[in-house]
């Protein structure tokens, strides 16, 4: 009797040990995914923090220098869907490793660029992997967190990007201010190399992460609801970039603060984004549209306050937190809705979401620079307000009035 009880206890302990080991491996895999998005986010957002530095280095004005930022966004918009479709059958682990390798190469080219045109080309190359990485990363994360938690999975992948805005981008901006903007991209490339090693070591080799037929991905592109959601994302999220792109000038020129305050402002914005992302992931899995309505609605209020009282440093810092939190709270809902409309193509929907967000990047930077030329720096806030309002109205008119997603949505969100 005692021998049987002892054997049963040993078996239970062994099962517990195996479960704990599996949990640790899953956490390391999720960490490696977030580390990749941390590097990608640092590269993307640090470019905005060092905008004044490389514009002066190339002898061009700030509006012209934003072409390099726009080129990165175009790389994401084009690269995300194209790479995802081209690599549809590729194992997601192999795809992630290839994408980070290309990311490292693009950032090294950025560091060596002799002209603004060459830098724009290098930033385009750097942007190509982003959309496909987030799409494949979300699929891998879903493999570990389970069905019915698509919002949580995407938020976990996005966590690396939001943390990049707290630590990566401010530190990279500070590095650029102290050692030169080229060193920023060298440091980002080195971090990308560490990310590659983490993915290689901790994302398991398994057929469960294999790709699928390209035809199944292409079917999703014929759905109007997918494209409507893309428009909503591109418009609604643009305000975050209309503000973030010009944080440096808003801090130093509008508020007359020292350049050393810019990394602090970037960090405050990043804390807001991280908080919003975590809240948004939970809302996306529980409610169909609440995260988007709350996020865009709150952003409009904060942007109005910033546009009205943005010359006050306290208002500026508080509004930077608020805009980051509000817009990021809406993004997981966008991802869950996209996947609901095309549950058979989750990787492509992740890439399409990131493509839409980088259309927002380009649109926000363009709209901000356009109005700044004629109405001053603070007018970029009102450009962002108009874009987010347009995105919210587009959702109400199109996606919000459409029928609830098909059975794929219920299958995806139902508890297992």
Image: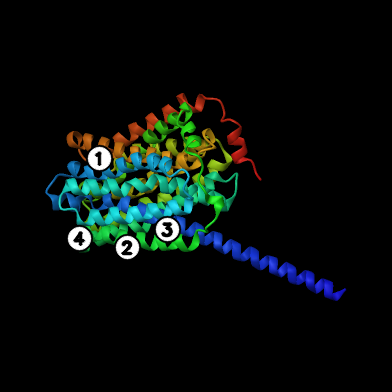
Label 2: which secondary element: helix
Find residue 50 and report its horizontal and vertical position in percent: 24, 53
Of the two numbered discs 2 and 4 on the same chain, state the one appearing first in sequence: 4
Q: In the drawing, does residue 234 fall left or right of residue 32?
A: left
Q: Quadrant of residue 192 in the image?
A: bottom left
Residue at position x 21%, y 63% in the image: 178
Label 4: which secondary element: loop
Find residue 251 and report its horizontal and vertical position in percent: 25, 50
How busy is the neighbourhood of tag 3: few (under 14 within 10 Å), some, or many (20 plus)?
A: many
Label 1: which secondary element: loop
Alpha carbon distance from label 3 to label 1? 34 Å
Q: Tell me the tag on residue 180.
A: 4
Alpha carbon distance from label 2 to label 3? 12 Å
User: In this rendering, which labeled residue sits more in front, label 2 or label 1?
Assistant: 2
User: In this rendering, which labeled residue sits more in front, label 3 or label 4?
Assistant: 3
Of the two numbered discs 2 and 3 on the same chain, state the one appearing first in sequence: 3
Q: Decide: is 226 above or below 156.
A: above
| Residue at mark 1 | 378
Of the two numbered discs 3 and 1 on the same chain, state the one appearing first in sequence: 3
């Amino acid at each position: 009797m005692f021998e049987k009880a002892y054997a049963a206890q040993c078996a239970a302990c062994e099962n517990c040990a195996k479960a704990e080991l599996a949990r640790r491996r899953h956490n390391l895999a999720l960490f490696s995914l977030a580390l990749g998005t941390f590097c990608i986010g640092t590269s993307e957002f640090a470019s905005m923090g060092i905008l004044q530095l490389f514009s002066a280095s190339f002898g061009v004005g700030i509006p012209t220098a934003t072409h390099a930022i726009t080129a990165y966004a175009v790389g994401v918009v084009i690269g995300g869907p194209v790479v995802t479709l081209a690599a549809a059958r590729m194992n997601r682990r192999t795809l992630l490793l290839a994408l980070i390798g290309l990311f490292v190469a693009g950032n090294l080219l950025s560091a060596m660029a002799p002209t603004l045109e060459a830098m724009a080309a290098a930033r385009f190359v750097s942007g190509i992997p982003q959309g496909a990485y987030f799409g494949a990363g979300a699929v891998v994360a879903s493999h570990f967190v389970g069905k019915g938690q698509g919002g949580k999975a995407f938020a976990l992948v996005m966590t690396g990007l939001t943390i990049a805005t707290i630590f990566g981008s401010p530190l990279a901006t500070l590095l650029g201010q102290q050692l030169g903007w080229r060193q920023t991209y060298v440091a980002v490339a080195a971090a990308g190399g560490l990310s590659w090693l983490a993915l290689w070591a901790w994302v398991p080799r398994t057929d469960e992460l294999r790709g699928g037929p390209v035809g199944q991905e292409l079917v999703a592109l014929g759905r109007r609801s997918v494209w409507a959601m893309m428009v909503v994302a591109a418009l609604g999220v643009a305000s975050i970039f209309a503000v973030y792109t010009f944080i440096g000038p808003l801090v130093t020129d509008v508020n007359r603060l020292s350049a050393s305050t810019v990394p602090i402002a970037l960090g405050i914005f990043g804390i807001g984004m991280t908080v919003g992302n975590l809240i948004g992931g939970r809302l996306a899995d529980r409610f169909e549209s609440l995260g988007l309505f709350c996020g865009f609605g709150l952003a409009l209020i904060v942007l109005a306050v910033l546009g009205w009282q943005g010359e006050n440093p306290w208002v500026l810092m508080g509004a930077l937190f608020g805009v980051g939190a509000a817009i990021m709270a809406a993004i997981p809902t966008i991802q869950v809705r996209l996947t609901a409309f095309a549950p058979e193509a989750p990787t492509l929907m992740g890439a399409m979401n990131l493509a839409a967000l980088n259309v927002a990047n380009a649109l926000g930077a363009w709209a901000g620079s356009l109005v700044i030329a004629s109405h001053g720096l603070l007018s970029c806030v009102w450009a962002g307000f108009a874009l987010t309002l347009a995105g919210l109205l587009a959702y109400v008119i199109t996606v919000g009035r459409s029928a609830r997603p098909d059975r794929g949505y219920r299958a995806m969100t139902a508890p297992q």
